Structure formats: structure tokens, C-alpha cells
Amino acid sequence: MNTQPPAPSSEPTLSIADVERDTGLLKDTLRVWERRYGFPTPGRDAHGERRYDGAQLHKLRLIKRLLDAGHRPHQVVPLATAELAELVQKVPATSTCQPIESAANPLVEEWLRGLKDNRTEVLRRSLEDHLLRHGLASTIEDFISPTSMAVGQAWLLGELSVFQEHLHTEIVQSVLREALAVLDKQTVPAPHAPRVLLTTLPDEQHAMGLLMAECFLALERCERFPLGACTPLTDVVNAARQLKVDVVALSFSAHQPPNDTVAGLRQLREQLPEDVALWVGGGAPVLYSRRLP
């Protein structure tokens, strides 16, 4: 087992906290793997703190994707990066087991090319044009959803940088929020439509799915109360009571640890009033593989 830290490099490195935020792998998990499997192999800064290079971050992203798909740490952590990438290619892109086929979708191919070339204004205009021609629902289902899955896969495989993935997110979110603002000016809540609070649980920072869900709720003329991401459980419960909502809607990405997801849902269900429904969705495999509270 190689226990030597990597040779010094001029490449920018990340702290263990940065890696935890990026991958969703806990700091303690990274330390255990370091002792047990000899990976990761962080360097040390002048203060003795761990520093991780881009190659290790890329490998950890692949490992996290495989863990989310059901692999065990001892099966994947010792593997080489090329072997991990090959396994990831065989993992269904979504919980519905439908692989991403960007070659069959010119919209996805064009979007990925635009991101790789950093043509942000072109991408924004193409998304706005699709929205005008096809409407909000079709744009989410036929454009935003497949491109977002493809972007996530490309980022995971190292074909897109972190900043390019962030550009995608910001472009899509700004266009959707503008569309919501226009829709809200044109409609009023339906008399008997549910009042819906939207958020994610603590440590779930991915809010794209939440925004897309809000768009569909707006089309149904529901009254919405978006709280953004990472709301503490006690605040979710307090908000649900004070706002007198009918539904609490939560979004979970594939990065969210499954046990944390189930535990959070169980705790929330126990604390919410019985007449408040709990709606969940997103890319977390546990939502579709376990009986939820």
C-alpha cells in the first residue's frame, strides 16, 4: 500500500472541507479510506492540513457516483481511475434507469459544446428562444432536464470544469426565475390548489430540481413558498405551521447520503402536522429503492 503523499505540484489544491462539499463524501470517510485503502493520498500544506489535487477529486467524484449506485467502498475505492470511469458509464443516469443519449439529442450536444466553449450568452439566448417557442413545461422536460443530466455526467467524467457546471446552473436558474416572474404576473392562485412550501434538507445544496418543481406548481396555479436550499428541519416545521401550507415539497440530488435522506424524512414526518403532505423527488436513488416514511 502506498502511504507516501504525492510529490509537490504547482496545481491548485483543495482542502478536505472543499472536497467534502464538492463530492458529498464526509471528512471522516475520506480519512478512513486513506488508512484502509491507501486512497486518497493528500499532500500537506505548511500547517499540516490535507490538500487534494484535481486528479484525486476526479477519482472521488467517480467513487461517489458508484456508491450512490449501490457499490460498496471496498469494491471501488482501490480501483484505478480508468476502471472507475468504465463502471460509471454503465450506471443508469437517472433513477428511472434511462441512460443519457446526448448523441440522439441535438439540443444536448449543442448545449455541451456551448459550455465547453464558454459561450454563455449564446446558451442563454437558445434557452430563452426554446421557452418562447415551446412553453415552460416543454422546455423543462425536453431541454433543461436532459441537458442538466448530461452536464452532470460530463462534469463527473472530467469533460467539464466546475466553473462550467456552475455556469450551466446559473443560466438555467436565471431563465427559469424570469419565466416564473412573468407567469406570476399573468395568473393568480387557483381557489382550491394546494399551498406548497419548497426546500431541501440541511446539507443538500442542489436546488435545481426544486426550481423546476416550482415551475410546474406555478403552471397549476399553486401558491408557493420557496425557502431555497439547506433549511434546518425545525425551520421547515415552523414555516409549514405558520404559513399554513398543505404540502412540504423536498428535492434530493444523487449526492445526498441515503441514510441521511431517510432519517431526515422520518424526523420531518414525525414533526409535521398530520394534515400536511410530504412530497419528495429528485435523483437520489434511495427515493426509489426504499420504503420512505
Image (cartoon, rainbow, N blue to C red):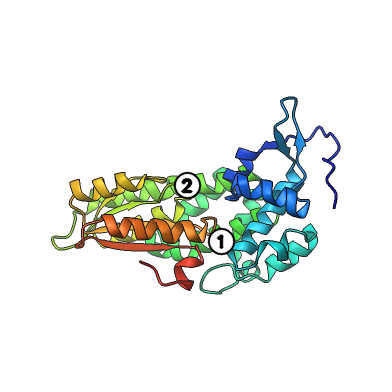
Q: Which residue, as the protein is rendered here, is positioned at the far bottom? A: 97
Q: Residue furthest left?
A: 191
Residue situated in front as seen by the camera: 147 or 272 = 272
Q: Residue at 85% of width from left, 42% of height from top?
A: 4
Res 214 quadrant in image: bottom left
> Who's the residue at 26% across and 59% down the image?
247
Residue 181 is at least partly visible in this image: no
Left or right of 191, for residue 93: right
Residue in the foreground of this view, choosing between 286 and 104: 286
What amino acid is labelled 1 in the image? Answer: Met
The disc at residue 203 is 2
Residue that badge 1 annotates: 149
- Side (left or right) of 270 relative to 231: left
Q: Nearer the viewer, mark 1 or mark 2?
A: 2
Q: Could one spot residue 245 in this view of the protein?
A: yes
x and y percentages locating residue 234 in the rendered image: 31, 46
Residue closer to the observer: 69 or 162: 69
Query: Where is residue 43 shown, x and y percent of the image?
Result: 77, 37
Q: Report x, y in % for residue 219.
A: 29, 60
* Sequence-first disc among 1 and 2: 1
| Amino acid type, residue under disc 2 in the picture | Asp
Where residue 73 sits in the image (x, y, percent)? Answer: 67, 61
